[in-house]
Image: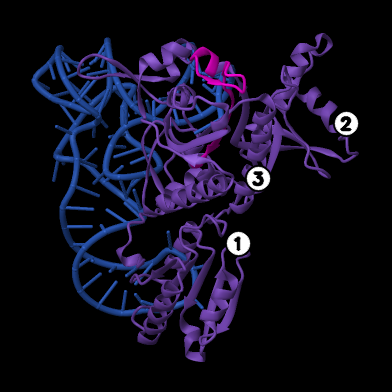
Amino acid sequence: MRRSRAFIPTTKEAPSDATLPSHQFLIRGGFINSQGAGLYNFMPLGKIVLDKIRAIVKEELDKAGCSEVQLSFVTPIGLWERSGRADAMGKEMLRIADRHQNEFVLSPTNEEAMVELVKNRVTSYKDLPLNLYQINTKFRDEARPRYGLLRGREFLMKDGYSFHSSTEDMIREFNLMEVTYKKIFTRLGLNFRVVAADSGAIGGEGSKEFHVLADSGEDTLVVCQSCDYGANIETIDELSNKIEEFKETSYEELQNIAINSKCACGGELSFKKGIEVGHIFQLGDKYSKALEANFNDENGKPKPFEMATFGIGVSRLVASVIEQNHDENGCIWTKATAPYMVNIMISNIKETPQVALAEELYLKLQEAGVSVMLDDRKERFGFKMKDAELIGFPYTVIIGKELENGQVQIFDRKSKENTSVNKDEIYSKIMELI
RNA sequence: CGGGGUGUAGCUCAGUAUGGUUAGAGUACCUGGUUUGGGACCAGGGGGCCGAAGGUUCGAGUCCUUUCACCCCGACCA
């Protein structure tokens, strides 16, 4: 893409209401803009990042044997009345009426719809297991949307649902999804932890959360520095509530207790802030029973499906990448999430040799399938560099005054290092880096 | 949903206590010129239903009433 023709409205100042780095930089960098409380438009750069994340999620899920579907976003209220969630979810569900005054809901999640989809279509144990997912818009009418993409009302979430003939098989799938989620977050280049999300009835194994570690995270995690143990402090709070003598224990005291304890593996424990980007949950037959969704077992007897549910906050991940990877100048995208891998910056477009080399490199990289931006605007060096840093291209090739000596520079966004390269070697050097 | 706050140019904000020229600044944008290795400089220019609706007044961005929107702290949640 030529920068001169792109729609990337960057700004020097952030709106006053943006408090978090991801919120500020995504708006300043021209990735997103706000369309109302908890509502966001994705502009070209934001859309590219969103789609990259979505593609990786899809690829890994498909590899794990899941099938993608797409459910209608607008759903009849009756669907929610049958499961009892019309009342249970209350005002969080946005209700709308059509011209006939029939009531509808903008889907906040899709357990009911997915069960209805499978019900009476999958009727035999021979057709199980089955894992269906969608990556689709969700709407939750939050009491207080905030933090930009981290807590919007409208957001993009991948929600998956699996159906099984036995609890054992459901747990097998649950474990498979844990492995798959780890692959996804690793591919995205994120530093994350898996933590037990529920300490209660299911013994802490029935529900796991995936947290991206970032200072601005809303959840506090206790993590081991030696092994991969981690727990959400909420869990500990819940636990303490159940134990009488801990009733008066303050949050700080609780932290001290935890911090002075050792992990089961003997490692030191520490506190980290985390952003919840994934959640996997063993549902059992809660919804299949309520909605009378049965299959016939080996003996021809009807049984409700054993189910599990798996979520990934796709649009939240866009912000999470930045919460974890940024500096005072802007975004630092991981290679897997960068809107463009390489930015070719022409220092002075009045210098014909600079333009010629830039155009040549631009073409070659495009032909090699590299996602590349050509900054061909009539702007000054400093302006373009600030812009490149704000947007966060992993690499910027600076074609400028050193070209007289046959040299160009590669600016590494993450390390902020400038490396001089002979102009004839720039292509191969870039191909080596990415 | 409780408590607090803010709505004036694309963005950041003055102006509102005490009503009174044609509503301002910075930034961004357009034109011309000078610049060209870290968000340049000079000159000129365009841009506003002062959130909305009522009211008080000779006169309202400013006072009164109503309403809408947005933000912050908390409770709640992917």
Occupied quadrant, residue A156: top left
**Which percent across, then down, holds residue A235?**
72, 24
Dot 3, crowdedness within 10 Å: few (<14), some or many (≥20)? some
| Residue at mark 3 shares a chain with residue at mark 1 | yes
Residue depicted at 32% across the width and 57% down the height? A7
Write the start and end of the magenta stretch as one range: A288-314
Chain whose colour in the figure is purple: A
Q: Nearer the viewer, residue A166 or A260?
A: A166
Task: Describe the element under mark 3 as helix, strand or loop.
Answer: helix
Asked whether residue A399 is in view, the answer is yes
Q: Which residue is mark 1?
A: A414
Q: Disc 2 designates what residue? A: A261
Q: Tag 1: residue type?
A: Lys
Residues at marks 3 and 1, CA–CA distance in whole angstroms = 23 Å
* Quarter location, residue A432: bottom right
Q: Amino acid at mark 3?
A: Lys
3 vs 2, front mark: 3
Q: What residue is rendered at 88% in x and 34% in y?
A: A264
User: Which chain corresponds to the colour blue?
Assistant: B
